[in-house]
């Protein structure tokens, strides 16, 4: 392809968000789920969702051209991909993208005014959006947990502290796999009812104890063989993370292990690409969060009193899972120095 045509193609591709807007709007409305295995006319959509048949026809035609729907006569049916991946709850992981849509519109002013949100979005700011995000994380975590269990050295642990454990997906999976393991899950009081319901629905309320606490202010329970902190550090600033890791060191029994799961960046913080893009989202969603370089986290761990740090290891081979694992052991010497 000639250089000018290639440049133009790159410009168009990189700046195109129409397809994303159309897809996430359809999933927000649960269009694919509602259509299911049937064929629906634009008029049927008007009856169910409101609006005008003409507007729906324009929207549905675009979904057809994207390969997500098929048009037969004047009616529309889910295409094979939509039927497989976007109906019956399959689109859960796309809903937070819809919820963050308006926030992305504030990127220019966030940069030029240097203003960041006063509280974490959406976990502390909006319970409905927090629920959608937690369910989306749960969908991913269920897939990842299958691989992660095989990699983590949990067989000798009897007690596990899961800090910022979300809906308890990892705690539940670990305790199911290791029948002698008991987990204590710490979550922000704002989302506690959602967590209690999810753990009870999994039938694991006896094995996964839930504690409501803000780990940046409150004391944390102590006496654990393993502490697991997954996808938490990136939402906070340097001072909170350093203090959290010091607290977590004190939560561990002698020779206990801290497992950190997060997105680790290179030293220049320019790669991997996903982590750089995610950091921009965190600029809009959190008071001080961003993804951190592996070197930064290593330094905090050493300062917190961990002396053996292994990793990074991949959590899973899943393509959407660029996260990595670090395992830091609390030695007897660390114990004495704290
Ligand atoms: C991205 S989610 C990670 C959930 C789960 N650990 C996972 O890896 O899927 C981060 C979690 O940390 C919790 N969290 C954030 N700040 C917190 C705080 N200060 N105290 C307690 N929990 C907090 C949030 O409520 C949220 O559930």
Image (cartoon, rainbow, N blue to C red):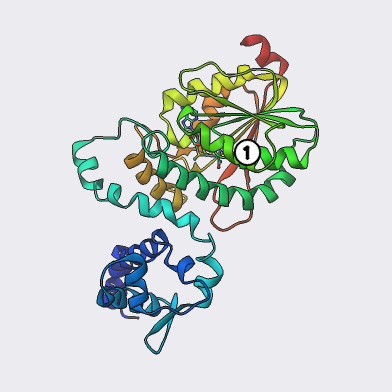
Q: Position of residue 179 (x, y in %)?
A: 80, 36
Q: Position of residue 67 (x, y in %)?
A: 44, 78
Quadrant of image for the N terminus? bottom left
Residue at 32%, 41% in the rendered image: 284
Quadrant of image for the C terminus? top right
Label 1: few (<14), some (14–19) or many (≥20) C-alpha neighbours in 10 Å:
many
Q: Position of residue 333 (x, y in %)?
A: 69, 14
For residue 112, which quarter of the picture? top left
Of residues 20 and 300, the one nearer the viewer is 20
Number of labels in the image equals: 1
- Please, is residue 289 above or below residue 20 in the view? above
Left or right: where does residue 228 sit relative to residue 118?
A: right
User: Residue placed farthest to the front in the image?
Assistant: 47
Q: Is residue 152 visible?
A: no
- Please, is residue 142 above or below residue 163 in the view? below
Left or right: where does residue 183 sit relative to residue 196?
A: right
Q: Position of residue 121 (x, y in %)?
A: 37, 38
- Please, is residue 240 above or below residue 33 in the view? above
Residue at 24%, 41% in the rendered image: 110
Residue at 64%, 17% in the rendered image: 222
Of residues 2 and 71, the one nearer the viewer is 71
Residue at 63%, 53% in the rendered image: 143
Residue tagged by mark 1?
A: 199
Q: Is residue 288 visible?
A: yes
Left or right: where does residue 261 sit relative to residue 233?
A: right
Secondary structure of residue under mark 1: helix
Of residues 239 and 215, the one nearer the viewer is 215
For residue 256, which quarter of the picture? top right
């Amino acid at each position: 392809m000639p250089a000018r045509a290639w440049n133009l193609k790159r410009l168009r591709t990189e700046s195109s968000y129409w397809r994303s807007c159309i897809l996430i709007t359809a999933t927000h409305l649960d269009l694919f789920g509602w259509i299911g295995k049937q064929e629906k006319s634009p008029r049927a959509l008007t009856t169910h969702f409101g609006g005008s048949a003409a507007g729906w026809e324009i929207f549905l035609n675009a979904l057809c051209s994207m390969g997500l729907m098929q048009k037969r006569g004047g009616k529309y049916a889910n295409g094979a991909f939509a039927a497989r991946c976007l109906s019956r709850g399959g689109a859960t992981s796309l809903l937070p993208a819809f919820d963050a849509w308006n926030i992305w519109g504030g990127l220019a002013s966030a940069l030029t005014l240097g203003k960041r949100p006063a509280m974490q979005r959406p976990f502390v700011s909006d319970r409905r959006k927090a629920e959608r995000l937690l369910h989306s994380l749960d969908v991913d975590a269920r897939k990842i947990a299958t691989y992660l269990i095989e990699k983590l050295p949990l067989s000798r642990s009897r007690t596990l502290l899961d800090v910022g454990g979300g809906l308890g997906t990892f705690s539940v999976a670990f305790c199911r796999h290791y029948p002698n393991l008991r987990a204590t899950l710490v979550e922000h009081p704002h989302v506690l009812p959602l967590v209690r319901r999810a753990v009870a629905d999994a039938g694991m309320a006896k094995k996964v104890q839930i504690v409501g606490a803000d780990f940046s202010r409150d004391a944390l329970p102590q006496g654990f063989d393993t502490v697991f902190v997954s996808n938490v550090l990136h939402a906070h600033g340097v001072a909170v993370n350093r203090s959290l890791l010091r607290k977590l060191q004190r939560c561990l029994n002698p020779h206990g292990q801290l497992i950190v799961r997060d997105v680790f960046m290179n030293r220049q913080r320019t790669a991997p690409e996903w982590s750089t893009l995610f950091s921009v989202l965190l600029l809009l969603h959190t008071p001080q969060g961003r993804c951190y370089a592996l070197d930064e986290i290593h330094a905090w761990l050493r300062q917190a009193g961990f002396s053996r740090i292994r990793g990074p290891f991949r959590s899973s081979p899943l393509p959407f899972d660029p996260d990595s694992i670090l395992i830091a052991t609390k030695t007897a010497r660390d114990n004495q120095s704290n």
